[in-house]
Image (cartoon, helix red, strand yellow):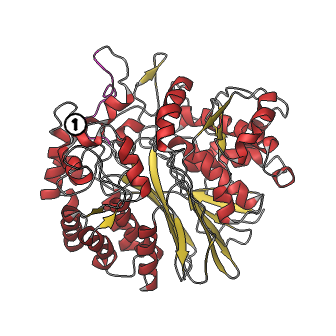
Amino acid sequence: MPRPPSSFTVLSLAAAGLWLALGAPAIAQQGLAPAPEAATGRTARALGTAQRFMAAAANPLAAAAGRDILRAGGSATDAAIAIQLVLNLVEPQSSGIGGGAFFVHWDEAGRKLATLDGRETAPKAARPERFLGADGKPMKFVDAVVGGRSVGIPGTVRLLEEAHKRWGKLPWPQVIAPAIKLAEDGFAISPRLGGLLAFEKNLGKDARAAAYFYEADGKPKAIGTVLKNPAFAATLRSIAEAGADAFYKGEIAQDIVATVTGHKDNPGDMTLDDLAGYKVEERAPVCGRYRVYTLCGMGPPSSGAIAVQQILGILETKDLARLGPGPEAAHWFTEAGRLAFADRALYLADPAFISVPAAGLIDEGYLRERARLVSPDKSMGKAIAGDPPNKRAQLLAPSDGIENGTSHISVVDAAGNAVSMTTTIEDGFGARLMTAGGFLLNNELTDFNLAPTEDGKPVANRVEPGKRPRSSMAPTIVFDAFGRLYAVTGSPGGSQIIGYVAKTLVALLDWKMDPQQAVDLGNFGSRNGPTELERGTEAEGWRAALQAKGHEVRLLEMTSGIQAIVKTPAGYLGGADGRREGVAIGD
């Protein structure tokens, strides 16, 4: 195996209506986490091509903002900032400055990889029983989400500022300007945003959100209606002039706290001190091998990179190139997913609170042992956590938890620097709270396990003051056998992110698909429950063969939002997920 670049820190080598009518009850009956965002159909996407640089994002206006920044000589980081702020407007259900993100950066000249953690944190007043009702049982998910109780301290603005200080080229106000202009000039409600508004039940109960997204009669504004957001423009102007402190202190912070604590039915307990004290954490990248490639991503509190690398480490024992996409490969893929999710449930949480055996979980010898648990002829059904090296004894119980929606940004600039950034406000439209500053607040605290104990034992991902909830976000950068940048990818999709990213990597690296083919390939996987196949895709056709091996198969709308860029000798190829509204564009 070739060595990874020496600077790495290596731990070890659905239509919306149909979904609501049919999918949501079925998912609830299966005991699975609800889909973070409903399906609104699929649109065919052409393979993106570029010679010098490329940006891929979940909305054409956001991707165009990133491309324009790159054309102006901006860095990948500058472009990612512009994209994120425009996404706050055009894809408000998924991410924004009221949420958090993980940022993976490759410095081509310095040959250095860095990962920044802008995940939301629990307020200092948070306690493990936060989401228990008067009867001592966990609240219903929607009851926990809507209101101030679920809102974590947002990290995105501080993250963007920190990234810009390290890797930005253009002036800070210049990279914010595209979003200010769009907020003031207005933009048309897209089909996806319009479709999700049509089936949203709680957003209109918030007065500010109702005034922005809905007509006077309570109906959502129609697709194509031009939305203007002068309040958000004013917020961004303050941040452009005074930096992130304008968000975490002063009038904007006061309004965030008032919005969170003032909810009449479900108030939170965030304070001004909580906001002022928020810090971005630089984490050691999690890097591992897959065949001749090196894959790098975000470490805990994200479970994404570890789980993706566990799946691929188990699959490395099979010749997937020979198998090709089909039921046999899906069998091995879903069994590997079961094993990865079993470990994730027991071991993964905020490393400031729990000893996470990250190196042991992706240890090659350990993964070979786990791979031996996979029978070629029969599904194991339900996997149990393994015993990885370097594990400390902890009396913990496994917990699956509920994790939800996001957006993903992939960028490569003209100098070869790359950003893979996954960003979130958690559930679709977050806590359904809009600030006076024109942005929605996250419900990230429901990414903690709602029950603090299982079978009398504490769970690793329980609520605690100052803690960051476990995530499945898996922003990923891939290097070839010579340590050269090869691919930049990631996806939204709640806990299904892990399967979406792993599928994309297998399609790119084993099946030699171009990035658009890899993104378009039907989704499949297992979160240590039923085998999940994407309805209406080639994966649905694998159902009978998998059932013959004992798989309990569920057909689902699997609304990924994968953005993938691959470097070639001629430039860049890009794939953007037609399940949302993404494009991959560049020059």
x, y percent for residue 146: 29, 36
Q: Is residue 433 above or below residue 91?
A: above
Span colored in magenta:
122-134
Task: Please tell me whether the stretch drawn in magenta is mainly helix, strand or loop.
Answer: loop
Q: Is residue 388 visible?
A: no
Image quadrant assignment for residue 53: bottom right
x, y percent for residue 302: 49, 47
Q: Quarter of the image containing the N terminus?
A: bottom right
Q: Nearer the viewer, residue 300 or 231?
A: 231
Q: Nearer the viewer, residue 312 or 367?
A: 312
Q: Nearer the viewer, residue 274 or 518?
A: 518
Say which element carries label 1: loop
Q: Is residue 133 magenta?
A: yes
Q: Is residue 485 visible?
A: yes
Task: Give the residue drawn at x 38%, y 62%.
Answer: 87
In-image side of 303 versus 508 (left or right): left
In-image side of 43 versus 238 (left or right): right
Residue assigned mark 1: 268
